[in-house]
Image: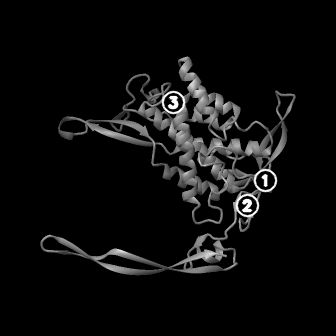
Protein backbone atom coordinates (compact mmCIF):
# COMPACT_ATOMS: atom_id res chain seq x y z
CA UNK A 1 0.00 0.00 0.00
CA UNK A 2 1.41 3.40 -0.98
CA UNK A 3 1.99 6.12 1.60
CA UNK A 4 -0.84 8.24 0.17
CA UNK A 5 -3.27 5.31 0.23
CA UNK A 6 -2.21 4.42 3.77
CA UNK A 7 -2.82 8.01 4.94
CA UNK A 8 -6.22 8.01 3.24
CA UNK A 9 -7.16 4.70 4.88
CA UNK A 10 -6.03 5.99 8.29
CA UNK A 11 -8.18 9.10 7.87
CA UNK A 12 -11.27 7.11 6.84
CA UNK A 13 -10.82 4.60 9.64
CA UNK A 14 -10.39 7.33 12.25
CA UNK A 15 -13.82 8.68 11.34
CA UNK A 16 -15.73 5.40 11.77
CA UNK A 17 -17.52 5.59 15.14
CA UNK A 18 -17.50 2.66 17.52
CA UNK A 19 -14.19 1.06 16.54
CA UNK A 20 -11.59 0.13 19.14
CA UNK A 21 -7.92 1.01 18.69
CA UNK A 22 -7.15 -2.52 17.46
CA UNK A 23 -10.03 -2.43 15.01
CA UNK A 24 -8.86 0.91 13.65
CA UNK A 25 -5.39 -0.52 13.03
CA UNK A 26 -6.93 -3.48 11.24
CA UNK A 27 -9.11 -1.12 9.22
CA UNK A 28 -6.05 0.88 8.14
CA UNK A 29 -4.01 -2.20 7.18
CA UNK A 30 -6.85 -3.99 5.34
CA UNK A 31 -9.16 -1.34 3.83
CA UNK A 32 -10.52 -3.77 1.21
CA UNK A 33 -11.52 -6.23 3.94
CA UNK A 34 -13.01 -3.39 5.99
CA UNK A 35 -15.58 -2.78 3.26
CA UNK A 36 -16.78 -6.39 3.69
CA UNK A 37 -16.65 -6.12 7.48
CA UNK A 38 -18.80 -2.98 7.40
CA UNK A 39 -21.31 -4.66 5.09
CA UNK A 40 -21.36 -7.69 7.38
CA UNK A 41 -22.01 -5.57 10.47
CA UNK A 42 -25.00 -3.95 8.75
CA UNK A 43 -26.22 -7.35 7.52
CA UNK A 44 -26.10 -8.76 11.05
CA UNK A 45 -27.97 -5.78 12.46
CA UNK A 46 -30.65 -6.03 9.74
CA UNK A 47 -31.08 -9.75 10.42
CA UNK A 48 -31.43 -9.14 14.14
CA UNK A 49 -34.09 -6.50 13.49
CA UNK A 50 -35.94 -8.85 11.15
CA UNK A 51 -35.91 -11.77 13.60
CA UNK A 52 -37.06 -9.66 16.57
CA UNK A 53 -39.47 -7.33 14.79
CA UNK A 54 -42.46 -8.78 16.65
CA UNK A 55 -40.77 -9.08 20.06
CA UNK A 56 -40.79 -6.54 22.87
CA UNK A 57 -37.07 -6.10 22.35
CA UNK A 58 -36.69 -5.46 18.63
CA UNK A 59 -32.90 -5.27 18.41
CA UNK A 60 -32.88 -1.78 19.86
CA UNK A 61 -30.07 0.04 21.69
CA UNK A 62 -27.48 -1.12 19.17
CA UNK A 63 -24.27 0.89 18.98
CA UNK A 64 -24.88 3.04 15.92
CA UNK A 65 -26.31 2.55 12.43
CA UNK A 66 -23.08 0.94 11.23
CA UNK A 67 -23.42 -1.94 13.69
CA UNK A 68 -20.17 -1.17 15.55
CA UNK A 69 -19.85 -0.36 19.21
CA UNK A 70 -21.01 -1.97 22.45
CA UNK A 71 -24.55 -3.29 22.38
CA UNK A 72 -27.14 -4.49 24.88
CA UNK A 73 -25.39 -4.00 28.20
CA UNK A 74 -27.19 -6.76 30.10
CA UNK A 75 -25.83 -10.25 29.40
CA UNK A 76 -29.16 -11.74 28.28
CA UNK A 77 -30.31 -14.18 25.60
CA UNK A 78 -30.91 -11.19 23.34
CA UNK A 79 -27.31 -10.06 23.72
CA UNK A 80 -26.19 -13.62 22.96
CA UNK A 81 -28.13 -13.64 19.69
CA UNK A 82 -26.96 -10.20 18.67
CA UNK A 83 -23.27 -10.99 19.15
CA UNK A 84 -23.62 -14.35 17.40
CA UNK A 85 -25.49 -13.00 14.37
CA UNK A 86 -23.10 -10.03 14.14
CA UNK A 87 -20.05 -12.32 14.12
CA UNK A 88 -21.74 -14.70 11.67
CA UNK A 89 -22.65 -11.88 9.30
CA UNK A 90 -19.11 -10.49 9.25
CA UNK A 91 -17.76 -13.99 8.57
CA UNK A 92 -20.34 -14.41 5.82
CA UNK A 93 -19.62 -11.05 4.20
CA UNK A 94 -15.83 -11.55 4.21
CA UNK A 95 -16.18 -15.05 2.70
CA UNK A 96 -18.52 -13.70 0.04
CA UNK A 97 -16.12 -10.88 -0.82
CA UNK A 98 -13.27 -13.38 -1.11
CA UNK A 99 -15.23 -15.43 -3.68
CA UNK A 100 -15.86 -12.25 -5.70
CA UNK A 101 -12.18 -11.34 -5.64
CA UNK A 102 -12.92 -8.15 -3.71
CA UNK A 103 -10.26 -8.81 -1.05
CA UNK A 104 -6.65 -8.94 -2.19
CA UNK A 105 -5.42 -11.52 0.34
CA UNK A 106 -8.02 -14.26 -0.28
CA UNK A 107 -10.06 -15.95 -2.98
CA UNK A 108 -11.76 -19.33 -3.33
CA UNK A 109 -11.16 -22.17 -0.87
CA UNK A 110 -8.87 -24.50 -2.80
CA UNK A 111 -8.07 -26.81 0.12
CA UNK A 112 -10.39 -29.54 -1.16
CA UNK A 113 -8.57 -29.54 -4.51
CA UNK A 114 -5.27 -30.46 -2.87
CA UNK A 115 -3.98 -33.90 -3.76
CA UNK A 116 -5.79 -34.12 -7.09
CA UNK A 117 -9.23 -35.63 -7.67
CA UNK A 118 -11.46 -36.19 -4.69
CA UNK A 119 -14.17 -38.08 -6.55
CA UNK A 120 -16.19 -40.54 -4.51
CA UNK A 121 -18.53 -43.39 -5.33
CA UNK A 122 -21.28 -40.91 -6.09
CA UNK A 123 -19.48 -39.78 -9.24
CA UNK A 124 -18.63 -36.23 -8.22
CA UNK A 125 -15.44 -34.34 -7.47
CA UNK A 126 -14.53 -31.05 -5.86
CA UNK A 127 -14.08 -28.13 -8.21
CA UNK A 128 -15.37 -24.63 -8.85
CA UNK A 129 -15.05 -21.84 -6.30
CA UNK A 130 -15.86 -22.92 -2.77
CA UNK A 131 -16.49 -20.15 -0.25
CA UNK A 132 -13.38 -19.63 1.89
CA UNK A 133 -15.17 -19.59 5.24
CA UNK A 134 -11.95 -20.55 7.05
CA UNK A 135 -10.37 -17.25 5.99
CA UNK A 136 -13.61 -15.38 6.62
CA UNK A 137 -13.91 -16.79 10.14
CA UNK A 138 -10.26 -16.08 10.90
CA UNK A 139 -10.52 -12.43 9.89
CA UNK A 140 -13.88 -12.03 11.61
CA UNK A 141 -12.39 -13.48 14.80
CA UNK A 142 -9.56 -10.92 14.72
CA UNK A 143 -11.99 -8.08 14.27
CA UNK A 144 -14.88 -9.11 16.55
CA UNK A 145 -12.88 -10.64 19.39
CA UNK A 146 -10.43 -7.74 19.60
CA UNK A 147 -13.08 -5.78 21.52
CA UNK A 148 -13.24 -8.32 24.35
CA UNK A 149 -10.17 -7.41 26.40
CA UNK A 150 -11.56 -7.31 29.94
CA UNK A 151 -11.36 -11.03 30.65
CA UNK A 152 -14.47 -10.85 32.87
CA UNK A 153 -17.61 -12.95 32.70
CA UNK A 154 -19.33 -10.74 30.11
CA UNK A 155 -16.27 -10.71 27.89
CA UNK A 156 -16.11 -14.51 28.02
CA UNK A 157 -19.80 -14.69 27.15
CA UNK A 158 -19.33 -12.43 24.14
CA UNK A 159 -16.32 -14.43 22.92
CA UNK A 160 -18.29 -17.66 23.17
CA UNK A 161 -21.25 -16.29 21.20
CA UNK A 162 -18.95 -14.72 18.62
CA UNK A 163 -17.41 -18.16 18.09
CA UNK A 164 -20.84 -19.82 17.87
CA UNK A 165 -21.85 -17.36 15.14
CA UNK A 166 -18.74 -18.08 13.08
CA UNK A 167 -19.22 -21.81 13.55
CA UNK A 168 -22.79 -21.58 12.29
CA UNK A 169 -21.64 -20.16 8.94
CA UNK A 170 -19.34 -23.17 8.51
CA UNK A 171 -22.09 -25.59 9.50
CA UNK A 172 -24.62 -24.13 7.04
CA UNK A 173 -22.42 -24.29 3.93
CA UNK A 174 -24.26 -25.93 1.04
CA UNK A 175 -22.90 -28.24 -1.65
CA UNK A 176 -23.63 -27.00 -5.16
CA UNK A 177 -22.92 -29.21 -8.19
CA UNK A 178 -22.75 -28.92 -11.96
CA UNK A 179 -23.06 -31.84 -14.38
CA UNK A 180 -20.51 -32.62 -17.09
CA UNK A 181 -20.87 -35.12 -19.92
CA UNK A 182 -22.09 -35.66 -23.48
CA UNK A 183 -25.64 -34.39 -24.07
CA UNK A 184 -26.16 -33.72 -20.40
CA UNK A 185 -25.41 -37.31 -19.40
CA UNK A 186 -23.86 -36.13 -16.12
CA UNK A 187 -20.96 -38.57 -16.35
CA UNK A 188 -19.32 -36.66 -13.56
CA UNK A 189 -20.36 -33.77 -11.34
CA UNK A 190 -18.16 -30.93 -10.15
CA UNK A 191 -19.18 -29.67 -6.74
CA UNK A 192 -18.25 -26.76 -4.53
CA UNK A 193 -19.39 -25.31 -1.23
CA UNK A 194 -21.43 -22.13 -1.35
CA UNK A 195 -22.89 -19.82 1.24
CA UNK A 196 -26.64 -20.20 1.86
CA UNK A 197 -28.99 -17.20 2.02
CA UNK A 198 -28.07 -15.44 5.26
CA UNK A 199 -31.65 -15.78 6.46
CA UNK A 200 -31.01 -19.53 6.92
CA UNK A 201 -28.16 -18.71 9.30
CA UNK A 202 -30.26 -16.13 11.13
CA UNK A 203 -33.11 -18.65 11.52
CA UNK A 204 -30.78 -21.33 12.90
CA UNK A 205 -29.23 -18.89 15.35
CA UNK A 206 -32.75 -17.93 16.42
CA UNK A 207 -33.33 -21.56 17.36
CA UNK A 208 -30.07 -21.51 19.33
CA UNK A 209 -31.34 -18.33 21.01
CA UNK A 210 -34.39 -20.23 22.25
CA UNK A 211 -32.16 -23.06 23.47
CA UNK A 212 -29.50 -20.79 24.98
CA UNK A 213 -27.92 -21.97 28.25
CA UNK A 214 -27.35 -19.99 31.41
CA UNK A 215 -23.66 -19.91 32.42
CA UNK A 216 -21.38 -18.54 35.09
CA UNK A 217 -17.68 -17.72 35.04
CA UNK A 218 -15.88 -19.97 37.49
CA UNK A 219 -12.26 -19.94 38.50
CA UNK A 220 -10.44 -22.95 37.07
CA UNK A 221 -6.76 -23.84 37.34
CA UNK A 222 -5.04 -25.52 34.43
CA UNK A 223 -2.72 -28.43 35.16
CA UNK A 224 0.07 -26.79 33.15
CA UNK A 225 -0.57 -23.24 34.27
CA UNK A 226 0.14 -21.87 37.71
CA UNK A 227 -2.27 -18.98 37.12
CA UNK A 228 -5.99 -19.42 37.60
CA UNK A 229 -8.09 -18.61 34.54
CA UNK A 230 -11.81 -18.10 34.09
CA UNK A 231 -13.93 -20.49 32.08
CA UNK A 232 -17.62 -20.33 31.28
CA UNK A 233 -19.54 -23.26 32.70
CA UNK A 234 -23.19 -24.14 32.47
CA UNK A 235 -25.41 -23.51 35.46
CA UNK A 236 -26.91 -26.97 35.45
CA UNK A 237 -28.10 -28.48 38.71
CA UNK A 238 -26.31 -31.84 38.29
CA UNK A 239 -23.72 -31.03 35.64
CA UNK A 240 -22.26 -27.71 36.73
CA UNK A 241 -18.75 -28.99 35.91
CA UNK A 242 -19.44 -29.17 32.16
CA UNK A 243 -18.54 -26.45 29.65
CA UNK A 244 -21.15 -25.16 27.17
CA UNK A 245 -21.18 -26.52 23.64
CA UNK A 246 -19.18 -24.44 21.18
CA UNK A 247 -22.12 -24.20 18.77
CA UNK A 248 -24.68 -23.15 21.38
CA UNK A 249 -25.48 -19.67 22.66
CA UNK A 250 -24.95 -18.74 26.30
CA UNK A 251 -26.13 -15.97 28.59
CA UNK A 252 -25.31 -14.71 32.06
CA UNK A 253 -28.46 -12.92 33.16
CA UNK A 254 -32.18 -13.50 32.85
CA UNK A 255 -33.80 -11.34 30.18
CA UNK A 256 -35.66 -8.29 31.49
CA UNK A 257 -39.28 -7.91 30.40
CA UNK A 258 -38.36 -4.95 28.15
CA UNK A 259 -41.68 -3.26 29.01
CA UNK A 260 -40.09 0.01 30.17
CA UNK A 261 -37.36 2.13 28.62
CA UNK A 262 -34.07 1.36 30.37
CA UNK A 263 -30.66 2.20 28.86
CA UNK A 264 -28.97 -0.26 31.23
CA UNK A 265 -30.81 -3.25 29.75
CA UNK A 266 -30.91 -1.89 26.20
CA UNK A 267 -34.69 -1.55 26.28
CA UNK A 268 -36.57 1.25 24.53
CA UNK A 269 -39.83 0.12 26.12
CA UNK A 270 -43.02 -0.85 24.32
CA UNK A 271 -44.88 2.47 24.40
CA UNK A 272 -45.87 3.36 20.85
CA UNK A 273 -45.00 -0.08 19.44
CA UNK A 274 -47.42 -1.34 16.82
CA UNK A 275 -49.22 -4.57 17.73
CA UNK A 276 -51.70 -7.05 16.27
CA UNK A 277 -55.02 -7.05 18.14
CA UNK A 278 -56.09 -10.48 16.85
CA UNK A 279 -52.79 -12.31 17.41
CA UNK A 280 -52.08 -14.51 20.43
CA UNK A 281 -48.36 -14.55 19.66
CA UNK A 282 -45.50 -12.27 20.66
CA UNK A 283 -46.82 -9.55 18.31
CA UNK A 284 -50.28 -9.61 19.92
CA UNK A 285 -51.36 -6.48 21.75
CA UNK A 286 -51.75 -8.30 25.05
CA UNK A 287 -48.19 -9.67 25.16
CA UNK A 288 -46.47 -6.87 23.28
CA UNK A 289 -48.03 -4.18 25.46
CA UNK A 290 -47.28 -5.98 28.76
CA UNK A 291 -50.98 -6.04 29.60
CA UNK A 292 -51.14 -2.23 29.78
CA UNK A 293 -53.63 -1.80 26.98
CA UNK A 294 -53.34 -0.25 23.55
CA UNK A 295 -54.57 2.69 21.52
CA UNK A 296 -56.67 2.31 18.39
CA UNK A 297 -55.98 4.67 15.49
CA UNK A 298 -58.46 5.06 12.63
CA UNK A 299 -56.60 5.53 9.36
CA UNK A 300 -58.12 6.86 6.12
CA UNK A 301 -56.25 6.69 2.86
CA UNK A 302 -57.34 7.79 -0.61
CA UNK A 303 -56.17 5.61 -3.46
CA UNK A 304 -56.52 6.63 -7.09
CA UNK A 305 -55.45 3.23 -8.38
CA UNK A 306 -58.08 0.69 -7.28
CA UNK A 307 -60.59 -1.55 -9.06
CA UNK A 308 -58.66 -1.07 -12.29
CA UNK A 309 -60.11 -2.53 -15.50
CA UNK A 310 -58.68 -3.02 -18.96
CA UNK A 311 -60.89 -1.54 -21.69
CA UNK A 312 -60.48 -2.70 -25.29
CA UNK A 313 -58.48 -1.20 -26.81
CA UNK A 314 -56.25 0.07 -25.16
CA UNK A 315 -56.97 1.76 -21.87
CA UNK A 316 -56.79 1.01 -18.17
CA UNK A 317 -59.34 2.82 -16.05
CA UNK A 318 -59.18 2.94 -12.27
CA UNK A 319 -61.53 4.22 -9.60
CA UNK A 320 -60.72 6.45 -6.68
CA UNK A 321 -61.23 4.52 -3.46
CA UNK A 322 -61.22 5.55 0.17
CA UNK A 323 -59.64 2.89 2.38
CA UNK A 324 -60.36 2.73 6.11
CA UNK A 325 -57.90 0.83 8.30
CA UNK A 326 -57.10 0.49 11.98
CA UNK A 327 -53.70 0.59 13.65
CA UNK A 328 -53.01 -0.47 17.22
CA UNK A 329 -50.15 0.83 19.36
CA UNK A 330 -49.14 0.05 22.94
CA UNK A 331 -49.90 2.58 25.68
Quarter occupied by the C terminus: bottom right
Q: Which mark is residue 53?
A: none
Mark 3: give few (<14), some (14-19) or many (20+) Cα within 10 Å.
some
- Is 28 left, or right, of 111 in this rendering? right
| Quarter of the figure with residue 129 | top left
Mark 1: give few (<14), some (14-19) or many (20+) Cα within 10 Å.
some
Residue 316 higher or lower than 322, as above or below: above
Select label 1 or label 3 by which is in front: 3
| Quarter of the figure with residue 87 | top right
For disc 3, the marked residue is 32
Mark 3 and mark 2: Cα distance apart in space = 38 Å
- Is 95 left, or right, of 238 in this rendering? left
Are the residues at dot 3 and dot 2 in contact (C-beta closer than 8 Å)?
Answer: no
Residue at screen point 71% across, 47% down:
244
Mark 1 and mark 2: Cα distance apart in space = 16 Å
For disc 2, the marked residue is 255
Name the N-terminal-most of marks 1 and 3: 3
- Is 298 left, or right, of 117 in this rendering? right
Residue nearest the observer in this picture, 19 or 155: 19
Residue 171 percent location from the top left of the image = 53, 43
Are the residues at dot 1 and dot 3 in contact (C-beta closer than 8 Å)?
Answer: no
Badge 2 element: loop
Residue nearest the observer in this picture, 14 or 117: 14
Name the N-terminal-most of marks 1 and 2: 1
Residue at screen point 69% across, 43% down:
160
Badge 1 element: loop
Residue 44 percent location from the top left of the image = 56, 48
For disc 1, the marked residue is 235
Amino acid sequence: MSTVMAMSADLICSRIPGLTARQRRMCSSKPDAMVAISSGAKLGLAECQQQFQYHRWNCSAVGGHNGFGHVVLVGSREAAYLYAVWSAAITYSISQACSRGAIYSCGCDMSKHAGGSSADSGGWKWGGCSADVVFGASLAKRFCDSREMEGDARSLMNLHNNRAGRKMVKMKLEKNCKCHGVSGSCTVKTCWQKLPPFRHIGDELMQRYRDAKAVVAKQSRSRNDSKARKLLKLQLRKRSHRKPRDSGLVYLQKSPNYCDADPVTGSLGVAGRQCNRTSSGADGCNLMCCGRGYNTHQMTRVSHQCNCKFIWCCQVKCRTCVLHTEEFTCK
